[in-house]
Structures are given as structure tokens and as C-alpha cells.
Amino acid sequence: MTLKDLKIGNTASVTSVGGSGALRQHFLDMGIIPGAEVTVVKYAPMGDPVEIMIHGYELTLRLDDAAEIGVEPCEASSSSGAVRTPDRKNEHPGLGEGGRFHPKGSGDPLPEGTTLTFALVGNQNSGKTTLFNQLTGSRQHVGNFPGVTVDRKDGAIIGQDDTLITDLPGIYSMSPYSSEELVSRDFVLKEKPRAIINIVDATNIERNLYLTIQLLEMGIPMVIALNMMDEVTGNGGSIDVNTMESMLGVPVVPIAAIRNQGISELVEHAVHIAKYQERPARQDFCDESDHGGAVHRCLHAVIHLIDDHAKAAGLPVRFAASKVIEGDQLIIDQLGLDQNEKEMLEHITLQMEKERGLDRSAAMADMRFSFIMNVCSACVIKPRENKEHARSRKLDSLLTGKYTAIPVFIIVMGLVFFLTFGVIGAFLQDILARGVDALTVVVDNALTAGGVNEILHGLIIGGIFEGVGSVLSFLPIIVTMFFFLSLLEDSGYIARVAFFMDKLLRKLGLSGRSIVPLLIGFGCTVPAVMSSRTLPSERDRRMTILLTPFMSCTAKLPIYAFFVNAFFARYKALVMICLYLGGIIVGILVALLYKKTWFKGEAVPFVMELPNYRIPSAKNVLQLLWEKAKDFLQRAFSVILIASIVVWFLKSFDFRFDLVEDPGQSILAAIAGILAPVFRPLGLGSWQIVTSLISGFMAKESVVSVLEVLFGAQGGVSSVMSPLAAASLLAFSLLYTPCVAAIASIRRELGRKSALYVVIWQCAVAWAAALIVRLIGMALGLG
Amino acid sequence: MDLIDIILIAAIVLCFASAIRKVIKMKKNGGCSCGCRDCEKDCSYRESR
């Protein structure tokens, strides 16, 4: 029987873990090991993937992968972790505190002035970035989705000179499964921080300690920050910190990062262990009496065998031995073992497998989880189901329910767009546009009254005010859109969308996790491209990045709003919806094309943790809004200001720098005229439109400002363009190359060739789509 | 040319120069001009390396 065959609510014990390679290792690292108890929570609305409960947390995986896991039905135990009430108060071991106990090392501090470097390591969604922000006073983005941090971030601890703490992407183990896990592992191994701050989610302690055990094996000074202790104690649980500290051999500090509780104590311990280089008192977690000590003997034999190689390679020997047994090729290569040694290692490992009755990876994972269970049974009193989880369960019955998930998703997204474009954003935009218009009139009158030079007057009103002013009024729409996207992400809803959209996205060759970059793409392509780093497979990551430009970003909104208001005011909402849907449909077609050609094969397995729903923090949301508004204003007064002035200059002068009466004689008309024939089949052959589209490559918003500058004197764009040409232009704007910032981020992620490919490919697709729109319009007699 | 014209020209030139400086700074940050929080931090991280 396999996990796939279990019904909702059924509990079973894992008997075998099939599959191979990194995915199998990932299953084991996530706690799916022989003997573990799993309960099926629910199936996604389309029947796949499945959500299971294991070690007290919820994990989702696809049915194909569930079919690889052998199970045997059993009765659910009352609690997933063996627990008992600690019967006596244990003395505090005092690790990481001055003048008490130095288990290893002489206690000599590092020389004054040495920078104490710390790595902040922990599972995904355990609160690392929240803690980082508390420690450093910085304002990094935090979200309720596994994998918000996709690159390392540095900062000094407040009030501690000569410290540098690095926030690393969340990882589940030291086996590199995704590129972010590799970033974290490489940092710890290669940059050798003076100490590690390991953040552990106390509400999900068994799985979090798995990473802790591997970090302890590295022998680097470490302090454990038991985060979310407020939730544990608030729900009737507790953790005997003193016992845990003596069992693990490193300081353990209970904290609640979000409430800033326990942070100063954590900093004191962290600085102490880093300064005195107090290494973990315990690195050996194998049990001599377990199955005749098979794993214990194997591990110690390997440690002796590779000791010299590990030292030469600068790797912690205990850690290297574990990885060699697990068959981690990256570590084996680094050790540079000779053939004899490799053969000897294989014999030792085979013998262990035979004696233990488990394969090497499962045996190592089992050894670690056995130790963790011992620690938990000695120190942890499990809380009753916490309020957050109970609330999530209730919400999930609606938001991920079989018949309700997809309709609710459509309603939620519809509501986001309706409120953004129809109610809040549009209302605020109207107010701002009136303000800008009034200011323009005031300045215009003042310049006239002051008898300012005519050319200068033209530059200020026709160039700067027309250009920058027209773009400024779109600020409210963009900020409102980001407000809703941020609410969805911070609440934990987007993780659910990934869960129930997986089956659909798999048909396009993508994984459910790809939905996150794609949804963020509706805000801005740059963070969307970056957020693709959480995808564990290179194939999925590349394909997702190449598809994000099809999701219409907020910077294109001013273009849509401008043309829709000018030409299709009666069908405003309909045209807007058609544009967004158009982008999605073309994206789907391109995805299918990629799947059949460039990205043949299946998307990687979907293994993801579903976080509890949380109420988004007002501070976090407001901070995001402020930064988006600041960013938009910065661009309006830099890129768009320059574009407006340059365009005004080029359209006002000819090559002899004489002022021209007819802009058709200007420098701009001559330059843009060269490209105009390419756009003629689309009905967009005028030099003004070509110019605006070129400027859109710098920043999409500037398309509108340039059109205002160029057409302003002729009574606006509606007097010189037909509705069909406007529709063709909208189709082109929707799909053509993303702005230079997005291209730069694609270049960073995929390289120069791919970035160039995106520019050319997007332009070609946009050209074809605009032509189709025009031909359909002409066939319908609209031209 | 009046004094007011000269003042206005000077103001525009200053604004223009400041805008160009800002764009150059953005470009230095790994070609990023989006300025959004995630990539801004990413850029400053890359710059600090």
C-alpha cells in the first residue's frame, strides 16, 4: 500500500521511501522516514496534489510522488511527538554566558576589532527575516510564504560594533535540493562565519531540529533561537530550555521575534560564543545501542578514513562523513578521495545498510530523527492545537475546498482588479489628476504673467508638466495594486494558490510554485524574476522567468488607462479584462510551445509546506506601499523627466538646432521615421508612436508621457489615431519587451543570451499579436 | 534674456543633471532601475561584495 491509496483522515506509518536522487533525499529531510506517522489532510480541488500531516506540520506532495512512499495503516497516536511533563527543574547549563562554563576552547577571546560574522540559518518561513530586521533595524521584506528570502542580506547588529549578520534563504537540510539551499550551504562552508544563529520554529520543533543537528555537525559556534515561543506557551505548551541546552550542547534562547522578545538575550549569547569561539559541546548524535550501533560504527569509521581529506579540503569532518555516507557527490568531489578509499567507504556503507535494514540515506535521516525524538520527549510539552492552526483549518475548508477553491480564487482576483481599477485606485487617480492639472494651469499662468521666454515656457509646460504630470497621476493605481498583492502574500493565501493550481500548471509544464512569480509579475517583473529562485529545478525556473513578461505589470497600466479613456471609455472594464486575459492566454500558448520544444519533460515534484494563515502586519504592508510609492516617484523624476525633456528637445528642433514649427521636420521625426515602416502593417507607422514605444523600453510609464508631449499640441492622441490603431497599439504594448530593469534582472538570472532572446522574442510576439488584432478589426469592418 | 529665464534654465539644468546622476547610480546597481525593495537590497548586497 502507498500513501497515494490513503483516504482523507486516514493515518499510516511509513514503511519505505521510494524514488531516487535529490528528491528522495528531500523527502527524508522533510521527515518522511520509515516509521514516521502520516495523516492525509486533504486533496487539492483537482484531486492532486495531496496535503499530509507529518511531525505536526502540513506538507503537500503530488500523487505520483505519494505513490513512491510505502505505508501501513495504523491508529493515530494522540500526539505526534512523544512528550512528557519534565518532572524537575534542571539547572541552567549556562552555555554561551561569560565566566560559567566553556566546554571546548580556551575561553580566549578573539582580538579586539575582529569582525564577528554571523549566519542566520533556519527553515523556510521560520521567521529569519523578521529576526534579521529586529537585530539589524533593517526593513527587509517579510512574507507568509516559504522562500521569501531568495538571496543573502547583510547588516550589523544594533548596538554591537564589529558585527555582520547575514540573513540566508530558508533551508530544510544541508543537502542541496534547490539553488537557495546551495546558497546557504555554500555560505556556511566557504565563508566560514564566526558563529551561526540557528532560528528554530518552536511550534514545529521536530522538523526544525533536523537542520539544527546538521549544523551542529559542522562544529561552528552556534546559538539556537527558539522562535514563536509566545505561540507555544499561549496554547498551553512549553519547552524545557535548560534540558534542551544540555542535550544539544549549545545555548538555547527562547524568543518571539515578531514581538521583539528575547532578542537582547540572544544577541548577548551570540556575541559571546562568537567572541570566545565556543563550539558545540556535542556533535555526535548516533546511538551505540541502536540496531547494534550499525550507523554509529559506520559513521565513526568513515570519520577516521576521511579525516585528512576533510582537513585538507577545509570541511568539518563529522559533517563531511555524514554527507559521504549519504552519497553527496559535491562533498565527495571536494574531498578528493582515491579509488581505494572510495571502495572502502562503499564497503563500510553497504555493511551498515545490511545491519541497519535501511538504505544509507534513510538510515542517516532515521539516526537524526531518533535523536530529535529523544530531545523532544525530554524537553517538549506539545501545545494543544494552536489558534493559528485551527483558524487556518477553518479558512482552508473554504479557500482550498474541493468545490470552492477555484471560484473563490477567481472572485478574489476579480475583486483585486475591480477595487484597483474601478473603485479605490481610480478614485484616488482622479483626485491626483485634477491636482496635477490645476498645478499645470497655475504654473502656465505664472509663466505667462512673468513674460518667460517662449521656448522655456514650452519646455516647462509642454515637456516637463505634460510628461511627468501625466505619469504621476497613475501612482494611486500602482500603489493600490501592490497593496492587494502584498495582503494576499502576507496572509498565506498565495501558498494555497500554488497548492491548488499545481495540477493545472503541470499541464503547461510548470510547477504549482511557479504561480508565485507569475502573480508577482502582475505587480513588477523584476521581483517576479527574482522570486523564481525558490523553484527547485533549473528547468522550471528558466521557463517561469521567460513567462513572467507575459503577465502585464503595473507599469503598463498608465498606457492601458490612457488609451482606454481616449478610445474605449464606454467599455473600460471589458477592455482592461481583455488585455489582462490576453496576456495570460498568449503566455499559456507560449508555455505550451516551450513544453513541446525547448523545455521538454515534466515539471519537478511539488513538495511544499503550507504555512498557517496570519493577519498581515500593518507595518509591513505600509512599508511596502511607501517603498513602492517612493520608487515610482523616483522614476518619475529621473527616467521619465529625462525622457520628457529629451523628447521635447528632439521634437522642437531640427538638425541645425533651429526651432521648428512643424514637429514633422524635427530631429525626432527623422530618427523615428527609420523604424516607422516596421510598424506600418500594424497601423502604427507614425513617428510619434514609434518614439513613444522606444521610450517605453526605458520605463513603460514614459510611453504615455512621450505621447502627451508629442500629441499635446494637436488636441490629444484621439484626434490623430483610429480606435483600431489604438487597439493594435494596446496589443503591442501588452506584449513587447519588458523595460530595461526587467531585462537586467533576467540577464542576472539567465545570462546575456537569454536576456537578448527575451527582447527579440517579446517584440516578435507583440508584433504578431498586434497584426492579428488589426486584421480581425479590418475583417469586422472597424478599420 | 531676463533674470527669471536664467533662473529657470539653471533650475532645469540642475534637475536634469540630478536625474541623470540618479539613473547612472541605478545602472551601477547591476543594471537595476526598478528600485523596488527586493532588488534594491539585492543590488546593495551585490555592490557591497
Image (cartoon, helix red, strand yellow):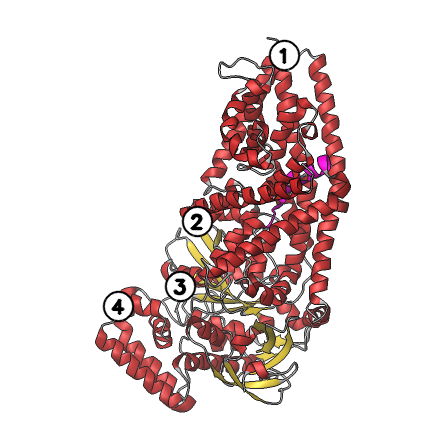
Locate residue B3, reporting x and y percent: 61, 10
Q: Chain of mark 3?
A: A
Nearest to N terminus: mark 3 or mark 2: 3
Is there one chain holding both mark 3 and mark 2? yes
Q: Nearer the viewer, residue A568 or A293?
A: A568
Nearest to N terminus: mark 2 or mark 4: 4
Nearest to N terminus: mark 4 or mark 1: 4
Q: Where is mark 1, residue-wise? A: A453
Query: Are discs 3 and 2 less than 8 Å apart at CB?
Result: no
Q: The magenta stretch spans which residues?
A: A551-567
Q: Chain of mark 2?
A: A
**In this rendering, position of residue B13 left or right of residue A723:** left
User: In the image, which is nearer the foreground, mark 3 or mark 1?
Assistant: 1
Q: Quadrant of the N terminus of chain A?
A: bottom right
For the residue labelled by badge 1, is the local secondary structure a helix, a strand or a loop? loop
What amino acid type is highlighted by mark number 3?
A: Gln
Locate residue A110, reporting x and y percent: 38, 58
Is there one chain holding both mark 4 and mark 1? yes
What amino acid type is highlighted by mark number 1?
A: Asn
Q: Can I make out residue A509 in this image? A: yes
Q: Residue A565 magenta-drawn?
A: yes
The answer to whether residue A424 is above or below residue B8 is below
Label the magenta part by its dominant secondary structure.
helix
Mark 3, Cα crowd under 10 Å, few <14 / some 14-19 / many 20+, is many
Q: Where is mark 3, residue-wise? A: A277
Q: Chain of mark 4?
A: A
